[in-house]
Amino acid sequence: MANDGPRERKPQKVVPSKAASTSNEKKKGSEVTFVPTPEARLKDLAADTHSHWEFGGPVGVTAMMTGFPCLMFYLWTCLWFYQGRFIRPESIEDIRPFLNRIGNHIYEDAYPTAFAFKMYLGLMAFQLIIAFLMPGKIQKGLPVPSLDYKTLTYRCNALYCCYFTLVVSSTLHLTGLFDLTQIIDHFGELMSVSMIVGFALSFLVYFGAIFFHWGGKPIRMSGWPVYDFFMGASLNPQIFNIDLKMWQEVRIPWVLLFHIAISAALKQYQTIGYVTPNLAFMVLATGLYLNACAKGEECIPQTIDMFYEKDGFMLTFWNFAGVPFTYSYSIVYLHRTDPSAYKLSTAAMTGVYCLLLLSYYIFDTAMSQKSNFRMELQNEFVPRDAFPQLPWRRVKNPKYIETKHGNKLLISGWWGFLRKPNYTADLIQSFTWGLCTGWSSPIAYYYVVWFTIVLMQRCSRDFAKCRAKYGEDWDRYCKAVPYTFIPGLF
Ligand code: NDP
């Protein structure tokens, strides 16, 4: 597998300086400037030009933008009022009363109140201020073709911000200034506010890009406003030198999701005098994910969301509303249902905890291996000590496939077994979020179902992009690493 093709190399030792000094990179003082080959320039230019519809084009994205908020309201109603059962009209005549019942639930328990706005906007303002003030590692992103291969710099202070947020929220709770259980009590209201904020910010970023080139020149524009609004217009909007996409990926969704879990656990403790292992599991699972995003923040500039995806409705709405208020369905189910309905045997619960920890380990180390490999090639690798630093997070003497484009594709570590080891591990994690609730509510499995669709779609878009970018070198890579998600099978 490793000896597949003449351009593949197995370096004796991959040290940053050696790895970075290929013919495609020039050293300027301490800066490495990527100089693409003419072929790579043409391919990157083609990749930045609209060529085909994604997500079903204008019709598909319109359906998603209208359907998704409706789905969120519907599933919230099922969980909040009907023990996680799918509800439906009893008959044709019942359709109107059924819709009225849902409307009343929304009006009474999910109205976007001033208090919910204060909580949500307060969190956003707080996260923006500390992102601006906190120290952090300066990380260079990948060369951006639409910025003539300039690399942007990112201040990675998410971990400090995250710990500081936890100190502040615990202090507020313990001093009685803000009871954290209010988050779960006002879940519906906060959900509605998050949707309003998601839409508002998407408009702001879109019109900012169109009229003021906020975040760079609009790229890959189709000419259909509704589609371009969904996909975004520019790549890198910033505010006070903070990259908006990177900030919104970690600081709001995962911080809020973790606090929703904490809030539900505190509420359960107040109500029944203990926290069930199921809800404690969700505190651990969301905490691990938040910590992983924060501690690996310097890996985020290497992800598709940062170097390829534009800042549009898809990312904005998803981060502000989708992640915190849909990935939390198992928490809401555990919060609203009597513990006797979801009690698992000790063996089953232990199994779910073990599966989470194992999949987390693979997810964390797979992401680190690829990112460290890429950073070493850019001469940007600096070891970090943020907790937890897991064994095999960095592959020594990695094997890779060298491409005509200039980039190198890792075929060692987890990346020697699968082309998407990070997706597989992430999917298993999302499955455990449902498993911890038992089998009583299908809605608790929403995350894994939705995430499977997202990652399959994302994977096919990514592979199409890589095939166009690397051509026959991508085929050699696929031959060297034949399986995508499950070794030997798929
Ligand atoms: P990847 O981390 O797999 O990044 C894909 C890119 O990495 C490719 O486009 C290519 O970029 C480069 N690449 C691919 N294979 C190799 C290789 N063998 N060696 C070196 N570089 C390679 O995908 P994502 O950015 O989509 O996802 C990052 C993580 O975020 C995943 O674990 C995913 O599960 C998670 N995620 C979580 C979400 C959630 O809601 N919980 C949502 C979306 C993602 P290039 O063109 O530079 O070669």
Image (cartoon, helix red, strand yellow):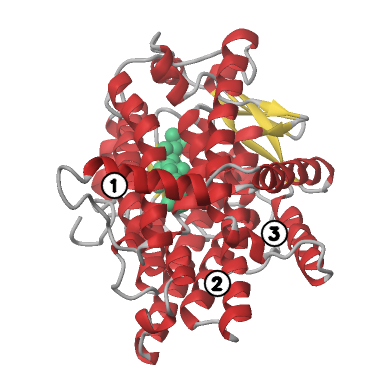
Q: Which mark is residue 98?
A: 1
Quadrant housing the N terminus:
bottom left
Q: Which mark is residue 284?
A: 2
Q: Residues within 10 Å of mark 3 (few under 14, many from 20)?
A: few
Q: Position of residue 21 (x, y in %)?
A: 60, 36
Q: Which residue is mark 3?
A: 384
Farthest residue, direction bottom:
346
Q: Which mark is residue 54?
A: none
Question: Can you name the residue that lies furthest to the left here?
Answer: 92
Specify the quadrant that holds the C terminus.
bottom left
Q: Is residue 203 above or below residue 478?
A: above
Task: State which image quarter holds ligand 1.
Answer: top left
| Gap between marks 3 and 1 measured at Cα | 55 Å
Give the crowd class for mark 1: few <14, some 14-19, many >=20 residues within 10 Å.
Answer: some
Which of these two is toward me, 297 or 401?
297
User: As rendered, which of 304 and 56 lies closer to the eye?
Assistant: 56
**Residue 110 sits above or below residue 182 on the image:** above
Identify the element where label 1 is drawn.
helix
Q: How far apart in space, not on screen, are marks 2 and 3 (Cα)?
A: 23 Å
Sequence-earlier tag: 3 or 1: 1
Q: Residue at x 55, y 19 (%)?
A: 206
Q: Are marks 3 and 1 in contact (CB under 8 Å)?
A: no
